[in-house]
Image (cartoon, rainbow, N blue to C red):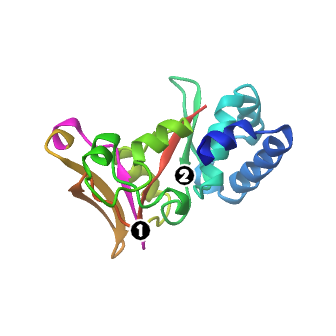
Amino acid sequence: MNNLSQNKRLFTPEIMESLLITLKTRFEKNMKRHPKLDWVDIQKKLESHPEKLRSLNEMERSGGEPDVIAFDEKTDEFVFFDCSSETPAERRNLCYDHQALEARKEHKPVSSALDMAAEMGIEILMEEQYQHLQSLGAFDTKTSSWLKTPTAIRNLGGAIFGDRRYDHVFIYHNGADSYYGVRGFRGSLRV
């Protein structure tokens, strides 16, 4: 059993309470990310969706520092993104997807970004979401994050990632089977 599966089993009421305190503290410290939202509404929604709290706990446990970045009125959902200054430390050294992982003949990483995101119950950020995150602050100034790759690019063996250098957000490409110590992924979760 891997650490993620084991941690899902160990999601106790005490861990949930601690997570809610951490999320509330981060929410209050970063009001510029969500100026018109109220924590009381968010906590009610979270408490009514314990499976989403488990996913947020995995985001937190792996270094993502999740925070609310929007409320989608159409779907009545709060949107959380990983808001750690650098790509989450426990989600680095991953190739893009399972196909890329299986294609590696040697020196395989432990997993892929898409596989790990699915196991956590989150979605990897799309390019537009990554650009929105970067409008809220300076993220990935020393690291980079895999992004949801358009099918046409993936079908040709590539994948995209983003970072921030020289006070500018760059979107690049790489072989989907590549992996680096400074590249991970950021996730999103709707509650």
Judge whether residue 60 is colored magenta. no
Of the 4 image quadrants, the one containing the N terminus is top right
Count of marks, rendered view: 2
Q: Mark 2, residues whose alpha carbon is within 10 Å: few (<14), some, or many (≥20)?
A: many
Tell me: 164 left or right of 159.
right
Q: Determine the residue positioned at 50% across, 23% down.
A: 74
Residue 121 vs residue 70, the one in the foreground: 121
Residue 36 visible in this rendered orientation of the protein = no
- Other residues around mark 1 within 10 Å, as few (<14) / some (14–19) / many (≥20): some
Q: Position of residue 51 (x, y in %)?
A: 66, 30
Circle number at residue 182:
1
Q: CA distance from mark 1 to mark 2?
A: 16 Å
Residue 148, located in which quarter of the rendered image? top left
Along the polypeptide, which appears first: circle 1 or circle 2? 2
Whether 134 is drawn above or below 75: the answer is: below
Residue range corresponding to the magenta coloring: 141-153
Q: Is residue 135 left or right of residue 46?
A: left
Q: Position of residue 130 (x, y in %)?
A: 40, 51
Q: Which residue shows up at 54% across the image and 52% down it?
A: 82
Residue 109 vs 3, above or below: the answer is below
Above or below residue 145? Residue 20 is: above
Furthest residue in direction bottom, as rendered: 166
SS type, badge 2:
strand
Mark 1 or 2, closer to the camera: 1
The residue identified by callout 2 is 82
Q: Position of residue 94 (x, y in %)?
A: 40, 55
Left or right: 77 as drawn, with respect to 92: right
Amino acid tagged 2: Asp
Which residue sits at x=64%, y=33%? 52
Q: Which quadrant holds residue 168?
A: bottom left
